[in-house]
Image (cartoon, rainbow, N blue to C red):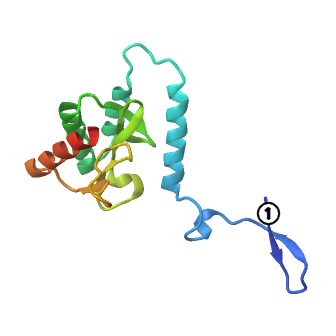
């Protein structure tokens, strides 16, 4: 649909719409549109029966396998930490990202740096996570490497988030 444009004579004419790329700061980025398409595929797949042996965890593992370099290493290690320290969380994909849910609702997720061309990966928590600490608390954490110190912090966050 074309947008209306007023001319100097007070008449309106049709002007062609421009793409989001031509209008900086407006609309969704290509990466955001791709994430929305991934979410639509996830919802469609969830409504269909799965093949024997196919699980949502296998979808998460397949997604991790497509990641490159440090993102892949971080994602795979984070998956192992979550499965070990919070086995009650169910792995699934969420907007194309590995996520972990409780009672069908996403509790936390891993966003690789490449997903939105960021300089670091992110471990994020939804409002379902009970990380409440006063009137303000962090819900996402930048990840560049996982040492024993970071792993211990993540385990503590998971235990608190699960409640």
Query: Which residue is disc 1 drawn over?
Result: 2
Q: Quadrant of the N terminus?
A: bottom right
At x 52%, y 56%, the residue is 30
At x 29%, y 51%, the residue is 132
What x and y, as percent, mark residue 129?
32, 44
Which residue extends farthest top?
A: 52
At x 31%, y 38%, the residue is 64
Q: Quadrant of residue 138?
A: bottom left
In the picture, measured across the screen, residue 9 lies left or right of residue 38, that is: right
What x and y, as percent, mark residue 63?
36, 37
Which residue extends farthest front?
A: 134
Q: Quadrant of the C terminus?
A: top left
Is 113 rendered above or below residue 5? above
Q: Is residue 95 shown to the viewer in this render?
A: yes
Number of marks present in the image shown:
1
Front residue of 85 and 145: 85
Is 100 rendered above or below residue 8? above
Is 108 rendered above or below residue 16? above
In the picture, measured across the screen, residue 15 lies left or right of residue 37, that is: right
Front residue of 95 and 31: 95
At x 27%, y 38%, the residue is 162
Mark 1, other Cα within 10 Å: few <14 / some 14–19 / many ≥20: few
What x and y, as percent, mark residue 47?
54, 24
As helix, strand or loop, the secondary structure at mark 1 comes to: loop
Which residue extends farthest bottom?
A: 8
Q: Is residue 62 shown to the viewer in this render?
A: no
């Amino acid at each position: 649909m074309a947008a209306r444009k007023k001319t100097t004579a007070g008449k309106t004419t049709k002007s062609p719409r421009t793409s989001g790329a031509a209008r900086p700061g407006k609309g969704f980025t290509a990466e955001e549109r791709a994430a929305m398409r991934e979410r639509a595929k996830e919802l469609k797949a969830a409504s269909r029966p799965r093949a024997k042996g196919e699980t949502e965890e296998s979808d998460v593992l397949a997604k991790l396998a497509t990641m490159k370099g440090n993102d892949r290493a971080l994602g795979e290690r984070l998956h192992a930490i979550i499965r070990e320290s919070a086995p009650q969380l169910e792995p699934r994909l969420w907007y194309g990202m590995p996520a972990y849910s409780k009672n069908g609702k996403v509790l936390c997720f891993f966003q690789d740096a490449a997903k939105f061309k960021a300089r670091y990966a992110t471990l994020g928590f939804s409002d379902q996570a009970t990380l409440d600490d006063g009137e303000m608390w962090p819900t996402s954490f930048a990840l560049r490497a996982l040492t024993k110190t970071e792993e211990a912090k993540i385990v503590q966050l998971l235990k608190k988030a699960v409640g």
